[in-house]
Amino acid sequence: MLWSDPDPNVVGWAPNERGVSYVFGVEVLAQFLRRMDLDIVVRGHQVVEDGYEFFGRRGLVTVFSAPNYCGEFDNAGAIMNVDENLLCSFQILKPSPLALKERGNMLTSMVKIPHVEMKTNKLFRRGMI
């Protein structure tokens, strides 16, 4: 799963389009969450249009923090915050050619996502995350 991408159209595992890794479906994610006693997987390394994107009944979220990635995508970026009650929220970084040129503050909004709550799992309790 580490270098693989989620795909809602895949059952199980399949080679990705680039031929260098794999994609996985919703059931693979569900099995992983059960086996690891987790509520959510937070991942990056994949451009998503709005800066963040949920998958598998919110069991996985992709967070991508580079707006206007490589000057080729008109994507937003996002930063995920987790509060003391384990409620997730996202700060959206909108693409702006002027802001990119001046390296200004592109933080434009805070989006609260209701009902994305995580139970305290073993890794949080042990201070590993």
Image: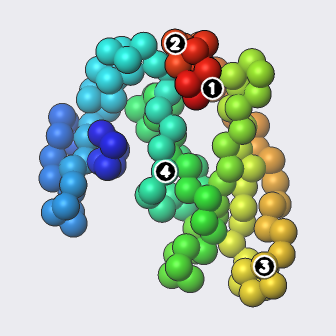
Q: Amino acid at mark 2?
A: Lys
Give the mark nearer the N terminus: 2 vs 3. Answer: 3
Disc number for residue 116: 1
The amino acid marked with disc number 1 is Val
Mark 1 crowdedness (10 Å alpha carbons): few <14, some 14-19, many ≥20: some
Label number found at residue 103: 3
Q: Residue at x 75, y 87 (%)?
A: 101
Q: Earlier in the sequence, mark 1 or mark 4?
A: 4
Q: How far apart are the alpha carbons under marks 2 and 3?
A: 39 Å
**Mark earlier in primary sequence (3, 1):** 3
Q: Residue 117's x, y, as percent? A: 64, 21
For the residues labelled 3 and 1, say whether their Cβ atoms are less than 8 Å apart: no
Q: Residue at x 17, y 40 (%)?
A: 13
| Front label number (1 vs 4) | 4
Horizontally, residue 50 falls left or right of residue 25, namely right
Looking at the rendered structure, which numbered label has been put on residue 122? 2
Residue 11 image offset from top left, x and y in percent: 19, 36
Residue carrying label 4:
44
Name the residue located 79 percent from the left edge and 68 percent from the top edge: 106
Tell me the crowding category of disc 4: few under 14, some 14 to 19, or many 20 or more residues within 10 angstroms, Cα based: some
77 to 37, vertically: above or below: below
